[in-house]
Image: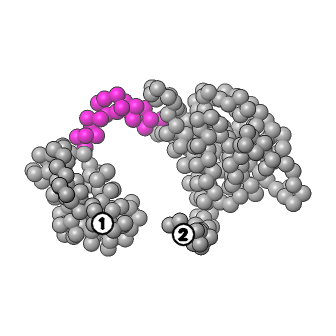
Amino acid sequence: MHEAAQDPDETALAARLRSVQADLTKSEAMIAQWLLLNEATLPMETGASLAAKTGVSEITVSRFLRRIGFRGMAELKAEIGSPAARMHLHAADRYMRLLEGELGTLLRRDADAILSLGAQIGRSEWDAAITAIDSADEVFVTGFQTVRGLAEDFARRLGIVRGSVRYVSAHDGGLVEWVPSRRRDGEARTLVLVDMVPYAREAEIVVRMARGLGMEVVVITDELNTWAQAHTPLVFHASTKAGAFLESTGPLATLLNLVTHAVAARDPDKVRQRISAWPAVLRDLGLY
């Protein structure tokens, strides 16, 4: 077997990690991957912060650093800053080079759109929306066309931090989930709808139906949506026009992640207990 040639743009640290990657444990591989992707910011890290960001213990980080030839973070940082290391194209240089091109422009626009979400979550309606989702006995999530996958992913992630979350599809199930049930009579229900241009024809109809059934409705949508506000004040916009061939779903995904986090933050201990109980349910499937 021939040893792979070293990339001339590869840093000394990357080359060192690549040389041992075939023999790494799962925890060590996670550390190595993080180091490879974040070499430019390593000078700002500590052993504790590296452990926290990779989900391993500080002892595991220390052992890994020793395995690849460093006595600690200080020695690793010194290696990165050494004259030999500067002979290679540094990760930070690659970052700046990317920012100068077309893709860099798109990245900056997406980053600006994500930062602008602060104005949305700073509104008084944000707290009302999180309350509506957190306190509901049952939460429904739906999305159409190109953002259906985004909505389904959100439903699964929200279902990790709270119970009784269901993705619904008007086309697949005919909204049979909304048929009144005497067993659940009087329970509070909330619909979260994710949508963006081009809006699905039935999106507004579904929202109107949910409101007619007494549900709270939260709409996560793009900056051009003008119809949702007529049905609910709980409408939150993310900028999706980054100048790419297709609209960017990145800011919408970030906004949905913030919703999940905010719901979990209402009762963190309860969420931790729920997550701790999850492996026992999966044990017999042997998925992990």
Q: Amino acid at mark 2?
A: Gly
Q: Residues within 10 Å of mark 2 (few under 14, many from 20)?
A: few
Tell me which numbered mark, 1 or 2, is placed earlier along the sequence. Answer: 1
Foreground of the two, 281 or 105 = 281
- Residue furthest out toward the right: 182
Is the magenta region chiefly helix, strand or loop?
helix
Instruction: From the top left corner, tell me how far across and down residue 25 is, in percent.
Output: 33, 68
Q: Is residue 224 above or below residue 26?
A: above
Q: Amino acid at mark 1?
A: Leu
Residue at mark 1: 24
| Colour basis | one colour
Residue 132 in view in this figure: no
> Which residue is rendered at x = 58% and y = 49% of the image?
153
As helix, strand or loop, the secondary structure at mark 2 comes to loop
Task: Give the residues in magenta.
Answer: 92-113
Instruction: From the top left corner, tell me how far across and down residue 102 is, in percent.
Output: 34, 28
Instruction: From the top left corner, tell me how far across and down residue 169 is, in percent.
Output: 71, 43
Residue at mark 2: 286
> Mark 1 or mark 2, which is nearer to you?
2
- Residue furthest out toward the front: 1
Whether pointer 1 and pointer 2 mark residues with C-beta atoms closer than 8 Å, the reply is no
